[in-house]
Amino acid sequence: MRPDVRSAAHKTDAFGELVCSNSLKSEQEHSAPWLLKREMRRLDSLLMKAANVARVPGGHALTVDREVFSAEITRAIETHPNITVKRQEVRALPDEGVVIVASGPLTSEPLAQEIARVTGAERLFFYDSISPIVAADSVSMNVAFRASRYGKSLDGTDDYINCPFTKDQYNLFIDELMKAESYQPHIPEDKTPYFEGCLPIEEIARRGRDTLRFGPMKPAGLDDPRTGRWAYAIVQLRQENQRADSYNLVGFQNHLRFADQARVFRLIPGLENAEFVRFGQMHRNTYINSPALLLPTLQLKTDARVFFAGQISGVEGYAESIATGLLAGRNAAAVAHGREPAVFPRATALGSLCHYITAADPRHFQPANITFDLLPALDDDAKQKFKRDKKARHGEICRRAESAFQEFLHANHSGMYCQVSG
Ligand SMILES: Cc1cc2nc3c(=O)[nH]c(=O)nc-3n(C[C@H](O)[C@H](O)[C@H](O)COP(=O)(O)OP(=O)(O)OC[C@H]3O[C@@H](n4cnc5c(N)ncnc54)[C@H](O)[C@@H]3O)c2cc1C
């Protein structure tokens, strides 16, 4: 619908716009996000290819230049001979044809109302928040230093800029943060659930003076070259784009007033003269109660013509949204060609993600990121074998996923999953 109808967070009219962080999460071998991305790459994901082209240094994470990333996707879609792009707000679901609803966390109000009507839901949203970005040349590098936690960097460089606090500086920062004013949410506080994996920092600080120091401001594994020790607390800045001219404050999503953000965040050592390219903001997150509504193929139980994908299908995060988009797209193509839609094996990351959003308890459903908790536990023998070694347990889960994935591809190789690379 962009650019004619805008959302509260999108800034461009390009496809695949990343509205907050520029990270598609870990690339560390045998981590759950790595496994999910690996499976998507095996299925020739367009967005994974775009991410490779747009990659910027980000420790063990897959971080991208957001402009290059979305330009790649936009070019591929706009020049595809079978795709007609119509830029308009969809206000009602089409009555015929195969449909994928992928209108995201900021689905416009008329469509949200239509989806609520079709699904019989009372309300489709909760609140989430985004972190600020600063100009690179406004960071004082005589205070801040470059390092990756425990030296873990994919390409051997020190990818993050780190702003180290002494105990006094941290206490002053917390005092001022607690005094800062928030924007009032549009619905009353007690009815505003947050996504626990993306809490605003002022909410984390309210849970205890040291909670930030053990969360997004944890100093562990970051030796300050000036003292040779870990600081009392750290704020990490992650590179935003390939030009490396802006950095985001990792984990600093918040919904404080902009003037208060500028005042309080300039108390961060190294950011005394920070120029803010963007401030943190709070946003609505729209999603359906998918366990009650969707089949594991991502089709609506009451109308198999309609698929849901992306954040609105009850997943949380860029990579997870891309994953459900990939599966819904392939399944919608299968249905359109009169073939059976596929369910990926439960042992795979793709299968487990779809299993979670369609089989969780619908009474307490919360969107989820990909984690090993979503994948089936190892059997008792394997648990015993790798009892003391978490890394080996994760490695085993990944090996099991890989073999289930291979088997699935062999069984389906004549169908829509035949175009497989890697
Ligand atoms: C502010 C914000 C910050 C986020 N930060 C992160 C983060 O840091 N890391 C992370 O992993 N995830 C983050 N997320 C969560 C989520 O992973 C991303 O929003 C992701 O982009 C979701 O992908 P999507 O394709 O489902 O939706 P989107 O990328 O939002 O795409 C949906 C598209 O549908 C369009 N649309 C909406 N309504 C209509 C309509 N009625 N008619 C036509 N078009 C419509 C929108 O304009 C948009 O272009 C954030 C979400 C928000 C809103």
Image: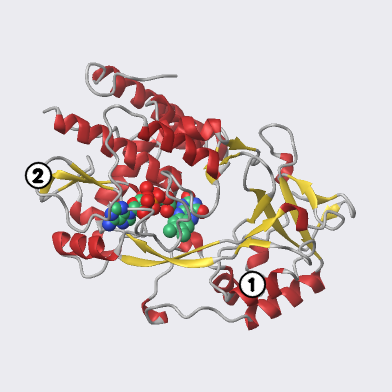
Q: Is 418 above or below relative to 129?
A: above
Instruction: Give, as a three-letter code, the residue at label 1.
Output: Gln
Question: Mark 1 sits on what residue?
Answer: 261
Q: On the rendered image, what quadrant is the C terminus found in? A: top left
Mark 2 touches mark 1? (CB < 8 Å): no
Viewer-nearest residue: 291 or 248: 248
Pointer 2 residue: 96
Closer to us: mark 2 or mark 1?
2
Q: Quadrant of residue 296?
A: top left
Q: Quadrant of residue 201?
A: bottom right
Q: Position of residue 184 (x, y in %)?
A: 47, 81
* Residue type at tag 2: Glu
The spot of residue 303 in percent (x, y) is: 11, 48
| First-in-chain label (2 vs 1) | 2
Number of numbered discs on residues: 2
270 relative to 152, above or below: below
Q: What residue is rendered at 64% in x and 76% in y? A: 259
Horizontal side, residue 150 vs residue 408: left or right: right
In front of the other: 295 or 56: 56
Q: Is residue 39 left or right of residue 341?
A: right
- Give residue 54's position: percent from left, percent from top: 56, 35
